Image: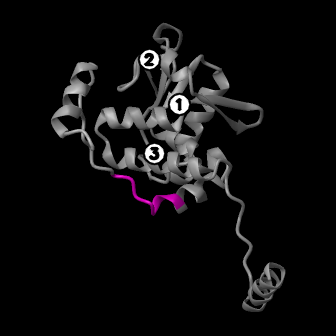
């Protein structure tokens, strides 16, 4: 017998949790777009979705080697999300504020929404290489998802949920599928049927 709704709610309350019901905004159609993004170089993803200025921002932050974790739209693009974002604006970095105060076009935040700050984001951060021997730490897709949910940005959270699901299904970027002619496809199927018999 399954527990009643009231029983489940009592257990949740006794544990100090709050019940939150959120409709899923994950769209499986994003998966193909995520795969397309992950087949590109990281900076190319940012260029395609946010423009050259945003890619240059990421390169500048990487070049100064600040101790922090990138989050926000640029970080999400580096992780593979397929959403366009504004070509102007500041890049978002979680860092110790006095150490990173003089960065231009960078919003330095000690504690992004939905997190407990830099130490929290460091746990699952990912190193993204931008080329020319430089790279930067980026918040994991799950941490980016937490941040976007805390901000109430449902579309962005849905796109990040697709990134998480894509990585769960295909841990490494899928290789390009071979394009077959009808004759090659028929021969491949016939060969498989022969071997399977």
Residue occupying image coordinates x 53% and y 42%: 53
Specify the principal SS of the magenta part. loop
- 7 lies left or right of 135: left
Which quarter of the rendering shows the N terminus? top left
Residue 29's x, y, as percent?
Answer: 45, 63
Q: Which residue is mark 3?
A: 160
Number of numbered markers: 3
Task: Give the numbered dot on residue 139.
Answer: 1
Snapshot quadrant of residue 185: bottom right
Identify the magenta region. 25-31
Among numbered discs 3 and 1, the one appearing first in the sequence: 1
Please tell me whether residue 18 belongs to the stretch shown in magenta.
Answer: no
- For the residues labelled 1 and 2, the Cα–Cα distance comes to 11 Å
Tell me if mark 2 has few (under 14), some (14-19) or many (20+) residues whose alpha carbon lies within 10 angstroms of its own.
some
- For the residues labelled 3 and 1, the Cα–Cα distance comes to 12 Å
Residue occupying image coordinates x 59% and y 57%: 35
Task: Give the numbered dot on residue 171.
Answer: none
Residue 42's x, y, as percent?
Answer: 64, 45
Please tell me whether residue 29 belongs to the stretch shown in magenta.
Answer: yes
Residue occupying image coordinates x 57% and y 42%: 78
Among numbered discs 1 and 2, the one appearing first in the sequence: 2
Say whether marks 2 and 3 touch (CB < 8 Å).
Answer: no
- 129 lies left or right of 55: right
Q: Is residue 75 above or below residue 31?
A: above
- For the residues labelled 2 and 3, the Cα–Cα distance comes to 20 Å
């Amino acid at each position: 017998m399954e527990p009643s709704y009231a029983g489940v709610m009592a257990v949740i309350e006794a544990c100090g949790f709050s019940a939150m019901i959120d409709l899923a905004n994950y769209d499986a159609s994003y998966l193909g777009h995520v795969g397309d993004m992950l087949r590109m170089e990281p900076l190319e993803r940012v260029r395609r979705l946010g423009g050259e200025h945003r890619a240059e921002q990421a390169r500048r932050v990487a070049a100064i080697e600040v101790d922090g974790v990138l989050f926000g739209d640029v970080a999400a693009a580096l992780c593979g999300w397929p959403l366009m974002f504004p070509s102007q604006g500041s890049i978002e970095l979680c860092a110790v504020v006095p150490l990173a105060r003089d960065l231009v076009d960078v919003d330095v935040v000690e504690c992004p929404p939905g997190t407990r700050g830099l130490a929290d984001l460091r746990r699952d951060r990912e190193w993204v290489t931008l080329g020319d021997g430089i790279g930067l730490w980026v918040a994991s897709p799950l941490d980016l998802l937490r941040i976007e949910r805390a901000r109430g940005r449902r579309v962005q959270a849905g796109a990040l949920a697709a990134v998480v699901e894509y990585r769960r299904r295909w841990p490494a970027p899928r290789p390009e599928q071979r394009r077959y002619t009808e004759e090659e496809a028929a021969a491949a199927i016939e060969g498989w049927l022969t071997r399977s018999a």
